[in-house]
Image (spheres, grey):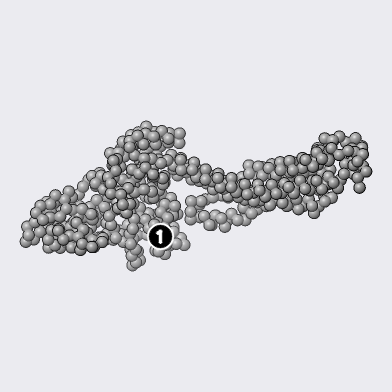
Amino acid sequence: MRLADYLSLSLRSLRRSKVRSLLTIFAIVIGATGITVMLTFVTSVKNLTVASFVKTGQIKQIQVSQQTNMTYDPSGTRGNYSNSPETGNSSTPSIVLTPTLEAKIASLPHVNGVAGMFRGHEQALSNISYAGKKWVVQTVIGYEANGVIKPALLAGRVLPAADSENQILISTSYADVMGFSKDYSKLVGTKISLHTSNGYAGFGANLPTRLPPQVQCGQQSKGCFGGPTSGLPATDIQATIVGVLDSSNSGDEPIIMMQMSNFLKIYNQYQPKKVIYDFQNQSSNGPNGNGTGGSSNNGGNNGGNKGGSNGPPPGPATVQGGWIKLSDADYLKQAGGFDSFMVEADDISNVAAVAASIDRLGVSSATGLAALNEQKSQANTIGLVLGALGFVALFIAALGVMNTMIMSVLQRTREIGVMRALGARRRTIRRIFTLEATAIGFLGGLIGVTFGSIFVLVAKPVITNMVKAGTLTGATFTVPPWLMLMVITGTSAIGFFSGYFPARRAANLDPVEALRYE
């Protein structure tokens, strides 16, 4: 018999028992639809993750930190900050992330570039203001905007390598309270004011030769800074918002990011070289805090001891020798070094070798490639779980196919006897029933893939809208051809194996007994 004859006999048999055939096919359709939808979502997310890592260059990045338990963070805004006061880690790390170490890492083979990141640990900035309203500044991050660190943005652009206009990036928590939650793009180009704390002596501050009376802090005062410059007034620094950070950078934390050079202008502040207090004739020297008499060391936010009961007199003073400050390199070293470096390798194949070379310098590293593999592994695990659920439904459907074929054999026993009496071979009978079961699986898979594709197409705008503000932005969510082929092939195979044993039973019937069957 020809294949067309087998197909004709199988389809004719399915048409004779329409209700039973439709119910059996429908059971397969449910499983096939579920597998198509679930695996499409997992596959789309995984493909998007890989594309994102490749497009942004994260796949070639290596993050460097003093911490041994660090995790890779492409934005550099989250992770382990060993120098932060809030961590409670007052110990000095054996290896400090200094500009010298940065240059050493940059000179390693297969390194394209290195960028440092530093989180402000002192409250040089107190609040930001826009349209007459103020909000407290919690976290300020400076980073070297040389293209290695690539913060994810919802609107705007990244910071330029050279910046003389105090351009900044802000988190969505600031953008929302400023009234731009519905359209972050309207915030791009907006000018705001950065208000410093009292006692500020950095970029934009007026540095007089006569100092006003300094602030006296009580023993239990919190957030109070004394010292020679503590009486200086606050300063307003104008800044321009050029981008809004994706929540994947900061979560709900209010964050301001700025170019490292501007960050150091604000945080690496000036100190008077020598201070002569009126009447007492006591002095205090510059940034190193080598005072004389009853003077106080300059530290914290422009010097002074908290709880200044033992500090110099509160009265006015004269600055002698002008204003001086530490070099940026010395300031970073004194502050405990950069919080982290981001290193870019020249090729994916060299990431592991570069990371190993960095580890030999005494610091820890985490690679974007390892982070990508971990995310892919998680996606594969989710896919296996969801696929297993779908295959449970298909297994139940397979039992239905087997039951349908057994019933078909019982109902067509006399027909089988006639075919055998007319010369049909056992393999012919077996092929007829096996092909019939395979057709049930094929039709169920085909309809299931069609339904799944329609569901994905209809739900695509909803899903895209749900994830537009997260890391899945730009996801296509389309059913890949290989998945369609896999589902249809799988359901056809399930039909084949489910019908194989009933087909063997039909082929092994005795012709004489089959003809006598009522």
Rendered image quadrant of residue 1: top right
Instruction: Tell me the quarter of the picture where residue 434 sits.
Output: top right
Residue 295 locus on image (x, y percent)? 12, 55
**Residue placed at 23% from the left, 58% from the top?**
200
Q: Position of residue 505 (x, y in %)?
A: 82, 40
* Residue type highlighted by circle 1: Ser
Left or right: 225 with respect to 246?
Answer: left
Q: Position of residue 492 (x, y in %)?
A: 72, 43
* Secondary element type, mark 1: helix
**Residue nearest the viewer, comparing 168 with 68:** 68
Residue furthest top as drawn: 109
Find disc 1 in the rendering and name its residue: 173
| Residue occupying the point 41% across, 45% down | 71
Nearest the viewer among 196 and 429 is 429
Q: Is residue 176 above or below residue 426?
A: below
Residue displayed at 72% across by 46% down: 398
Q: Residue at x 77, y 52 (%)?
A: 22
164 in relation to 3, above or below? below
In this view, the residue in front, 474 or 467, is 467
Out of 502 and 200, give the one closest to the viewer. Answer: 502
Q: Is residue 398 visible?
A: yes
How far across and how far down the image is residue 13, in percent?
83, 47
Disc 1 crowd rating (10 Å Cα; few below 14, some 14-19, many 20+) is: some
- 54 horizontally vs 407: left or right: left
How many circles with numbers are drawn on the protein? Answer: 1
The answer to whether one can see residue 435 in this image is: no
